[in-house]
Amino acid sequence: MKISPVTKIVGVFGYPIAHTLSPLFQNAAFKELGLNFIYFPFLVKPQDLKKATEAIKALNMVGINVTIPYKKTVLPYVDELSPEAKKIGAVNTIHHCQGKLIGYNTDGEGFINSLREEGRFEPEEKNVYLLGAGGAAYGISHSLIKAGIKSLTLTNRTKEKGELLLNHLKRVFPQICPLRFIEFHQRNSPTLLKETDLLVNTTSVGMNANDSLLINPEIFPRKIFIYDIVYNKNGKTKLMEVAEKRKLPCLGGEEMLIYQGAVSFEIWTKRKAPIKIMKKAIREKNAKIPYCR
Ligand code: NAP
């Protein structure tokens, strides 16, 4: 990568940011397509988010990804929202276009694209069970409902937040498919799991490699598809390890990371993202670290 007077700058705002893998695969993708772009991780403190977002214009950057904890708090600082980001109420990608900052949310699209492309799983007419009701759960549940799932069951440790998501979905998608919230202490219901085609973990449990499992794997039915959107320094969470051991179809957080990043890449560059190269960059990183797969 040669930095020149015309190098275009993109990156990610987060706090913390040291764990991010986005620079690795985004820079590999720019290099592959010969694009004079550089992707940089920015540690932005909460009190500096407004100034940092204004700097996208001041420094003539092309755009930015926004990660934990800013996906909602950045909303007042962008000029426009894509229809999707407006409905979800969160932004993970900003494009600086014709003097304006446009906010997008690529989490849901990245999730569904990876589910179909990498998991070979078609969500239409499937019963989905989603753990968590944080920022990621919003984009993912939107994309699942839009993909035509049969039903969605939610649970969340904090009941109020779970019900907030449920009511949000009922408002945005009235009468599309059965939506329900179950109490967190009922999350291991064998009847529920028996009916589940797709289980998605969107809680942050698993970020720490020692985190214990939220769901008892003994009651997983034989054909359930497990998608854990979390990744950790091992690359794989305990939930993924169990799913692989049980030979269940499954996908992990690195897949979603790449596919949501690919949508951001395409917004910024108007070029098709080289998914294979992005995956290779992550694979090589994992191979270099002895405790990774
Ligand atoms: P968030 O808004 O902070 O939400 C965190 C969620 O996890 C909440 O539902 C929270 O429940 C739950 N939670 C946290 N600790 C828990 C525990 N000990 N037991 C049960 N539930 C717990 O975060 P987010 O933005 O939604 O992100 C969630 C995870 O997804 C993070 O690990 C993030 O890195 C990952 N993620 C991955 C991708 C990807 O591309 N692979 C994209 C986005 C996010 P309460 O409401 O009770 O606090």
Image (tube, rainbow, N blue to C red):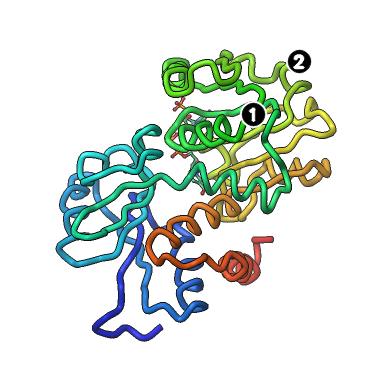
Q: Does 106 appear above or below 196? A: below
Residue under the point 57% across and 22% down: 154
Image quarter of the C terminus: bottom right
Residue under the point 81% across and 28% down: 221
Q: Pointer 1: residues within 10 angstroms few (<14), some, or many (20+)?
A: many
Q: Is residue 71 left or right of residue 245?
A: left
Residue under the point 62% across and 67% down: 276
Q: Does 85 appear above or below 97? A: above
State the residue position of label 2. 191
When asked about the image quadrant of residue 289, the answer is: bottom right
When asked about the image quadrant of residue 168, the answer is: top left
Give residue 25's position: percent from left, percent from top. 51, 67
Tell which of 278 and 158 is nearer to you: 278
Give residue 129's position: percent from left, percent from top. 64, 26
Residue under the point 65% across and 61% down: 291
The tally of labels here is 2
Asked which secondary structure carries label 2, the reply is helix
Q: Is residue 102 left or right of residue 275?
A: left
Q: Pointer 2: residues within 10 angstroms few (<14), some, or many (20+)?
A: few
State the residue position of label 1. 149
Q: Is residue 230 left or right of residue 245?
A: left
Asked which secondary structure carries label 1, the reply is loop
Tell which of 87 and 218 is nearer to you: 87
Q: Amino acid at mark 1?
A: Ile
Q: Amino acid at mark 2?
A: Thr
Give residue 240's position: percent from left, percent from top. 69, 44
Give residue 209's position: percent from left, percent from top. 59, 46
- Does label 1 or label 2 sit earlier along the sequence? 1
CB-based contact (under 8 Å), mark 1 and mark 2:
no
Q: Does 288 appear above or below 115? A: below
Q: Which mark is residue 266?
A: none
Label 1, label 2: how far apart the Cα atoms are: 19 Å
